[in-house]
Image (tube, helix red, strand yellow):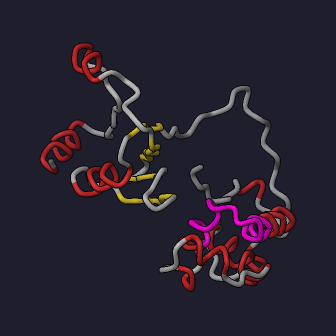
Amino acid sequence: MPTYDLIVEPDMLNLENLKKQAKLILRWHRERHYPVAAQIREHLPRFLNMPDSEILTASFKLSDAQEMVARQQGFDSWQALKNGLPTTLHEVKPSPAKAKIVSAEPQLFVTDVQTSCEFYCEKLGFSLVFSYGKPPFYAQLGRDAARLNLRLVERPIIDSAARDREELLSVTMTVDTPDEIKMLFLEF
């Protein structure tokens, strides 16, 4: 399961919500919820070079979770966050009539997660966001705003003859401008 930062919209940014987020992070750490380890590593420098298993067994207090929430919101510390929050409530915006999907993460089924990670990182310029298992059975790769999730399967799901015959497309990557198409092509 991919990890997500708990960044809230400015209208929802109040101290009570942030306290609840910190308590949730602390609970996830206590319950050894693996996705929180990647968030902890990203936002707290003392965990930077630790694997998930060490992060989840390390001492982690409410103050650590509060510092993490503060850093996710762009503050250096919990105290700076408390001092930087507006004291007046924001005007509540009406809910949209339809949910806005802001991103999608395709699941790519592969027979070798490690080799696939190396290909996407070395050949296509992605970076490893996280991986689970030794050898890995699940991983997420990222490049700019794109995310790809790799999931281990024992054998290919699509018959290779049908894939080649039908020219089945697995992934489309979109860039902002026509010039970037050429730039992307020149990278490879």
Spot the residue most to the front.
154
Which residue: 22% across, 20% down? 164
Which residue occupies the foreground of this view, 92 or 141? 141
Q: Position of residue 187 (x, y in %)?
A: 16, 50
Which residue: 56% across, 85% down? 46
Which residue: 68% across, 31% down? 99
Q: Residue 118 colored magenta?
A: no
Q: Position of residue 178 (x, y in %)?
A: 22, 36
Would residue 125 be found to the left or right of residue 106 on screen? left
Q: Position of residue 32 (x, y in %)?
A: 70, 66
Would residue 15 be found to the left or right of residue 176 on screen? right
Would residue 147 be found to the left or right of residue 127 on screen? right
Which residue: 63% across, 62% down? 34
Q: Quadrant of residue 159?
A: top left
Q: Position of residue 171 (x, y in %)?
A: 35, 32
Q: Quadrant of residue 8?
A: bottom right
Q: Residue 29 colored magenta?
A: yes
Task: State the predominant SS element of the stretch in magenta.
Answer: helix
The answer to whether 145 is drawn above or below residue 170 in the figure is below
The answer to whether 48 is drawn above or below residue 119 in the figure is below
Q: Quadrant of residue 18?
A: bottom right
The answer to whether 132 is drawn above or below residue 81 in the figure is above
The answer to whether 20 is drawn above or below residue 71 in the figure is above
The residue segment tinted magenta is: 25-40
Total marks in image: 0
